[in-house]
């Protein structure tokens, strides 16, 4: 409290409780008079007092009276009032550079007397009645700064537009705590499909950046060749030469930094894309491994550049030559590695886009059927035209996908049913025309036909892609086996030629012929290198170690040829020996890779990056909840569905069951471990009527068949997970192959007795495996397990990192000081200054 003596004039805050104390002599009454009111002081002897709350400017007079004199003395005063201002709030926002679903805010709040509360208010657009409040931390001083990352942990609904603002409250209890609001912001939470589309777009941008880096790297290679040549030709480098080297190192470092950033962005996008399918997407995991290797390679290159930078000051010819050659090797390896990463990433996303399109057309078919079944008042021309537009967008996306696929060095087979698309267009147009004519029942039939066809196209596309992936990995295994055979032949021929060079003098007439043979071997290895590189463009299992080994062998072959041609026989033979050693080490790596690919083919069947399993329930997660009894029960259920399908097939039009079970001449060298692969006999295919129905209900039957096929595939994946967990891969490997064989039979032959028998036999084998599992004491049936996977991206910036987005510094916490009003204004002005 502040005490003023001998005056009644003052400037006070609004709502201040003022107490007047007047000491008098010979006085019986003291009054405080305003323009229209008089207040009588309370008397205690000759001391008078009055207490009153002041909210507005007050002009008043104090008068004294006694029995003889009335209002003898009249003293005029003024109390000025400083109104309590509304709190102030200033908010800046910035979009996250890599995530459009995250916005960062930096806010400053202030009040002339003190702050009490800060909150975020959000609600669905246009529906403020459903507003929700999120309290934010605040220092209850005159001024504070806050940061917030929206939406943070707020639970928002996908596809809904939200409006939100920040609101701050002061400590003015008299006016029920006044508040001020920031501007209104808008945010729409993307649906899962929209998120994936955005991630695909981000990835496309990253790929373009890496494409440019690859072009720059090739330009740098040319410069490096010129530097190496110049360094070899000159005994001593002049100032200009040193400057060229300095500029090269500078550009190379910038290039390395760019590639590091793009590689990091590529990996982050990959990790954020469909995290719910992490367990089942081997292609994605292998691609991430290759990206990790690339980052390690970039670090090694960085070290080498630092060494070169030091060497350029004290140029030592031999050491510089060695470092330049080393850098040349690493650059060539980096170039190949980058080209491979780009192609694999493009391939991965083309596959994912194709899978997404298959899902989209299936969902669109469901929407179309739903509209066909809707009541007449809901089945409108406008809604049909909206679906027509969606189908046109699907066709454009398919066209764009085809174009992207053609841009791959090894284009994939992307299935497209053009006649089916034309049929859908015609049915949709007929439906639109009939709706225009108010022929709702006729339009409904066309709508259902269009929807049914779209669903069929979606299923067919998924099945064809899965079958194509299975074929692709088989081709890759065969190609790798051939490469390995060629490499072994090369190694033996190089060893024989080396032994002959040991016995041949330089002047010998056959020396030139031997050199030609060495050159032939160089060309042969180049073919091996090219074949393996081509394979690496579609097979992410080929690691950077293999690429480095290839580069090393190629370098030693070139060196051996160069040294032998210059009569450096001993050094040339040494390079040949390095070539043989490198080729043998490479053969070991390729042999291991071949085994891994064969195991992957046998265990997962569909090879790399099989379907998304989206929306299938049991297909997601780790599959740990499925024990063998569950799998046996589901297999039995599938057998029953197969029987039902066969019965309906017999009753359908055409009524042909036509098993046509040609036995074929399957043969193979395998002993059950997977090295040999029997080929199905050429004559073993069924006839045209292989258990499928006639034309009448074929679409329905195909739909049921596809569902059985999908469930059988999911069952195999669950069994594989279970076997891996229980350590029963050896006993269960044969079962997995049988399951895969059933899947192929379903695709090739549809509903027939032989496939059903195989499914029944499989149930018996599963029962035996369950018994073996129990006897080993590894029974874990009905064990409860918690899903530890969280698919929300929790990677968020700390408040300090958010502040860096705004180039600001932290404002220290402080207590409110008891300053006079004019000084309070100066303090606020200081902290509001943007240049702090």
Image: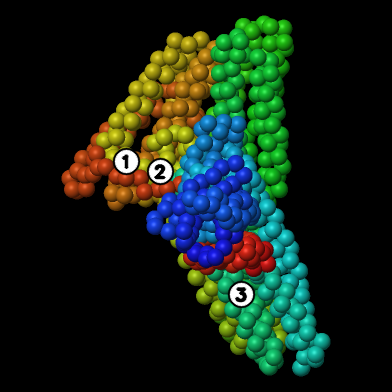
Which secondary structure lies at badge 2? loop
Which of the two discs, 3 and 2, labels the residue nearer the N terminus?
Answer: 3
Q: Position of residue 465 (x, y in %)?
A: 56, 37
For image coordinates 55% across by 13% down, the residue present is 373
Q: Are marks 1 and 2 in contact (CB under 8 Å)?
A: yes
For image coordinates 61% across by 10% down, the residue present is 377
Q: CA distance from mark 1 to mark 2?
A: 9 Å
Q: Is 92 situated above or below 442? A: below
* Residue 625, numbered circle: 1
Res 45 visible: yes
Place residue 427 in its image quadrant. top right
Q: Are marks 3 and 2 in contact (CB under 8 Å)?
A: no
Which secondary structure lies at badge 3? helix
Check disc 2 and report the residue beneath it. Answer: 621
Q: Sort mark 1 into few (<14), some (14-19) or many (20+) by Cα contacts within 10 Å.
A: some
Res 587 visible: no
Check disc 3 and report the residue beneath it. Answer: 301
Residue 104 placement, left or right of 782: right
Question: Which of label 3 and label 2 is nearer to you?
Answer: 2
Instruction: Quarter of the image for the C terminus: give it.
Output: bottom right
Q: Position of residue 45 (x, y in %)?
A: 39, 57
Residue 123 placement, left or right of 825: left
For image coordinates 59% across by 51% down, the residue present is 60
Q: Position of residue 28 (x, y in %)?
A: 46, 53
Q: Nearer the viewer, residue 499 or 551?
A: 551
């Amino acid at each position: 409290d502040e005490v003023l003596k001998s005056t009644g004039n003052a400037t006070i805050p609004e709502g201040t409780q003022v107490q007047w104390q007047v000491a008098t002599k010979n006085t019986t009454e003291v009054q405080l008079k305003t323009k229209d009111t008089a207040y009588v002081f309370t008397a205690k002897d000759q001391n008078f007092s009055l207490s009153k709350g002041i909210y507005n400017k007050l002009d008043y007079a104090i008068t004294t009276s006694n029995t003889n004199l009335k209002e003898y003395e009249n003293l005029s005063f003024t109390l000025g009032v400083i109104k309590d201002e509304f709190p102030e709030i200033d908010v800046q926002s910035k979009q996250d550079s890599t995530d459009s679903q995250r916005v960062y805010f930096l806010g400053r709040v202030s009040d002339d007397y003190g702050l009490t509360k800060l909150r975020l208010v959000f609600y669905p657009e246009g529906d403020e009645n459903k507003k929700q409040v999120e309290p934010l931390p605040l220092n209850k001083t005159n001024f504070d700064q806050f940061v917030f990352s929206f939406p943070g942990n707020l639970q928002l609904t996908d596809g809904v537009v939200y409006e939100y603002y920040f609101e701050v409250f002061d400590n003015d209890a008299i006016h029920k705590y006044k508040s001020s609001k920031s501007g209104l912001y808008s945010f729409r939470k993307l649906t899962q499909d929209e998120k994936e589309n955005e991630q695909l777009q981000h990835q496309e941008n990253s790929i373009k950046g890496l494409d440019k880096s690859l072009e720059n790297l090739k330009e740098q290679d040319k410069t490096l060749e010129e530097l190496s040549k110049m360094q070899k030709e000159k005994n001593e480098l002049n100032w200009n030469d040193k400057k060229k080297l300095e500029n090269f190192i500078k550009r190379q470092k910038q290039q390395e930094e760019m590639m590091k950033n793009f590689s990091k962005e590529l990996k982050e996008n990959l990790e954020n894309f469909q995290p719910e399918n992490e367990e089942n997407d081997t292609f994605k995991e292998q691609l991430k491994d290759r990206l990790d290797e690339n980052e390690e390679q970039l670090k090694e290159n960085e070290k080498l550049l630092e060494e070169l930078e030091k060497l350029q000051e004290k140029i030592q010819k031999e050491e510089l030559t060695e470092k330049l050659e080393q850098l040349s090797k690493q650059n060539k390896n980096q170039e190949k590695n980058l080209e491979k990463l780009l192609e694999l990433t493009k391939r991965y996303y083309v596959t994912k886009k194709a899978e997404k399109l298959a899902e989209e057309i299936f969902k669109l078919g469901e929407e179309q059927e739903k509209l066909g079944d809707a009541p007449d008042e809901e089945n409108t021309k406008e809604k049909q035209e909206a679906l027509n537009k969606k189908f046109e967008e699907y066709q454009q996306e398919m066209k764009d996908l085809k174009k992207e696929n053609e841009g791959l060095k090894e284009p994939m087979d992307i299935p497209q049913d053009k006649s089916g698309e034309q049929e859908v267009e015609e049915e949709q147009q007929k439906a639109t025309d009939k709706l225009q004519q108010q022929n709702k029942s006729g339009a409904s039939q066309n709508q259902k036909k269009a929807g049914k066809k779209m669903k069929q196209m979606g299923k067919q596309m998924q099945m064809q892609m899965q079958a194509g992936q299975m074929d692709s990995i088989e081709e890759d295994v065969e190609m790798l086996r051939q490469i390995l055979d060629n490499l072994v032949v090369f190694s033996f021929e190089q060893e024989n030629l080396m032994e002959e060079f040991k016995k041949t003098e330089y002047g010998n007439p056959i020396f030139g012929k031997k050199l030609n043979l060495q050159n032939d071997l160089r060309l042969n290895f180049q073919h091996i290198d090219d074949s393996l590189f081509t394979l690496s463009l579609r097979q992410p299992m080929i690691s950077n170690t293999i690429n480095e080994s290839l580069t090393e062998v190629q370098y030693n072959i070139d060196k051996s040829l160069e040294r032998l041609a210059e009569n450096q026989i001993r050094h040339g033979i040494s390079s040949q020996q390095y070539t043989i050693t490198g080729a043998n080490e490479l053969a070991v790596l390729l042999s291991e890779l071949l085994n891994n690919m064969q195991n992957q083919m046998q265990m997962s069947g569909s090879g790399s990056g099989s379907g998304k399993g989206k929306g299938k329930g049991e297909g997601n997660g780790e599959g740990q909840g499925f024990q063998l009894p569950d799998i046996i029960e589901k297999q039995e259920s599938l057998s029953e569905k197969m029987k039902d399908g066969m019965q309906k097939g017999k009753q359908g039009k055409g009524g042909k069951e036509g098993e046509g079970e040609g036995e074929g001449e399957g043969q193979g060298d395998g002993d059950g471990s997977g090295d040999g692969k029997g080929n199905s006999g050429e004559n073993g295919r069924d006839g045209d009527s292989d258990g499928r129905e006639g034309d009448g209900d074929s679409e329905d039957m195909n739909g049921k068949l596809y569902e059985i096929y999908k469930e059988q595939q999911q069952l195999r994946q669950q069994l594989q997970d279970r076997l891996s967990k229980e350590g029963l891969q050896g006993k269960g490997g044969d079962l997995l192959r049988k399951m895969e064989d059933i899947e192929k039979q379903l695709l090739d032959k549809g509903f027939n007795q032989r496939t059903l028998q195989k499914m029944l036999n499989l149930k018996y084998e599963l029962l035996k495996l369950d018994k073996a599992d129990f006897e080993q004491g590894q029974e874990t049936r009905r064990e409860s397990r918690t899903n530890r996977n969280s698919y929300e991206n929790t990677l968020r910036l700390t408040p300090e990192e958010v502040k860096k987005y705004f180039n600001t510094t932290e404002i220290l916490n402080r207590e409110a000081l008891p300053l006079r009003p004019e000084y309070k204004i100066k303090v606020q002005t200081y902290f509001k200054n943007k240049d702090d």
